[in-house]
Amino acid sequence: MFWAPLPLGSNRPWAWSILQISIFMLLLGCIFLNKNVDFLGLKKFKKVILIWVVFLVLASLQIIPLPEFIINLLSPNANLSPDAQRLYLSTDIGQSKVSLLKSYTYFGLFLCSLILIDNEKRVKKVLTLMVIVGSLQGLYGILEILLGTHFSLIFNIPVAESATGSFVYKNHFANFIMLCLSAGIGLIIAGLNTNQSMSRRDWSRAIVSSLLGNKALIRICLAIMVIALVMSRSRMGNTAFFAALTLVSIYALFADKNRSRGLSILVGSMLIIDLLIVSSWFGLDKVQDRLIQTSLVQEARDEVVIDASVIVADFPLMGSGGGSFYSVFPSYKKADVYAFYDQAHNDYLQMLIEYGVLSFLCLVAIVLLCFFAAIAVIKKRKSVMYKGAAFASLMAIMGMLIHMTVDFPLQAPANASYFIVFLAMALISSVNLSKRSRSPASARIENGH
């Protein structure tokens, strides 16, 4: 997780190859160390895992040679040229193989997360690591802009007026910072005092302790990341973060019966201090100007979405093949789209095009199960650490779902990896929800460790 964002968000073949090898080796280690545990301790997550397996089977069918009558039945517009020696559902076998390997990698990461993040201590470690990585990325992105460097310190890539950290694309950077901010807010919530009967003196001591203790360090990290997010000049990245924070906070304030006054103070400070004070010093007005000046006349993305929507009708069930958008779209785009688009700038549409309705519904089901699991944790769970993890997961899911409407954040392996870890933590936090929170030691014994 520390490595994933460093090499350009792992969005290069050599970088995602290293990431894939690392995850597969980690999965083999998890299997070996848990070989005596029934189903590797994953039985309680079988519903989500089964849906994920169905998706992988459907995606695998795209690169397997099939009889012509089956292809005619499932995808009549697939690769049926008379010169083809083998017939596939995918229109681009090479890219579909690359995408399939990524899908198996993400599934492996999901299993590793469910196996390894098995108690509150490890949940805290993962959230803390995300905050550290996000802060370093944010600081790096901020310094590049403030120092006026024309090329990045690593990989010597041109640096524009927007912060990008170790990423190439500013919107991928903004999305990654949004995910790490979610982790930081979850950590602070996990440290809130839920004692409703505290006196004014106790509240004063708690505030002083927060200002001088670990929470202050996390709060500084959050401020750094918010500044970096604003300096990315990403319209939807900023919108997704503040919208997700607001919506999830409102839900937590009404749904959590054991909430403390600290939650209200935290949300208020994030929205007031960061949005109105800190961010205004570092270019929030420029982000606002970009949002105001945005129009459908200037943007070509809406034309891309309109033209690409036709592809869904031609490949409805099984899709055109994972990773095939860049090779399929040119034959569908009209004259008003001049630039070359290798991504749809809408992950929902791109997934529908490349994988079809059946696989898309599997992915939707996985996200929704994790989403509602996090909602239930905030409402019912007593453990503040699991509540913090659920808050972070819910915020990350909502922020990602918002950002995906106009961009392709999941196409960056680093972002997709962090998002999958959040999905796993949502499920982990919801285990044995009807019971009282157990100690880490008892949880490990029950899981067979």
Image (cartoon, rainbow, N blue to C red):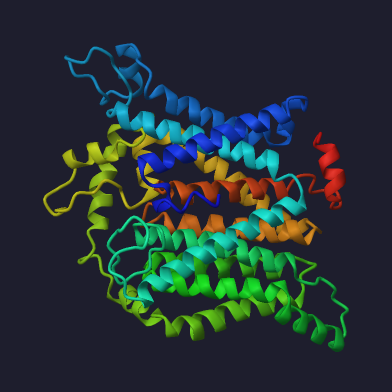
Left of 167 or right of it: where is 123? Answer: right
Residue under the point 31% across and 26% down: 93
* Residue 362 visible at all: no
Image location (x, y in percent) of residue 97: 37, 28
Left of 411 or right of it: where is 206? Answer: right
Residue under the point 41% across and 59% down: 166
* Residue 116 visible at all: yes
Residue 4's place in the image compared with 263, above or below, is above
Image location (x, y in percent) of residue 34: 73, 30
Image location (x, y in percent) of residue 337: 16, 53
Image location (x, y in percent) of residue 437: 84, 52
Left of 345 or right of it: where is 117? Answer: right
In the image, 283 versus 163, the foreground residue is: 163
Left of 33 or right of it: where is 360? Answer: left
In the image, 276 versus 209, the foreground residue is: 209
In the image, 377 versus 35, the foreground residue is: 35
Residue under the point 81% across and 70% down: 194
Residue under the point 75% across and 83% down: 207
Residue 174 image-quadrant placement:
bottom left
Residue 320's place in the image compared with 161, above or below, is above
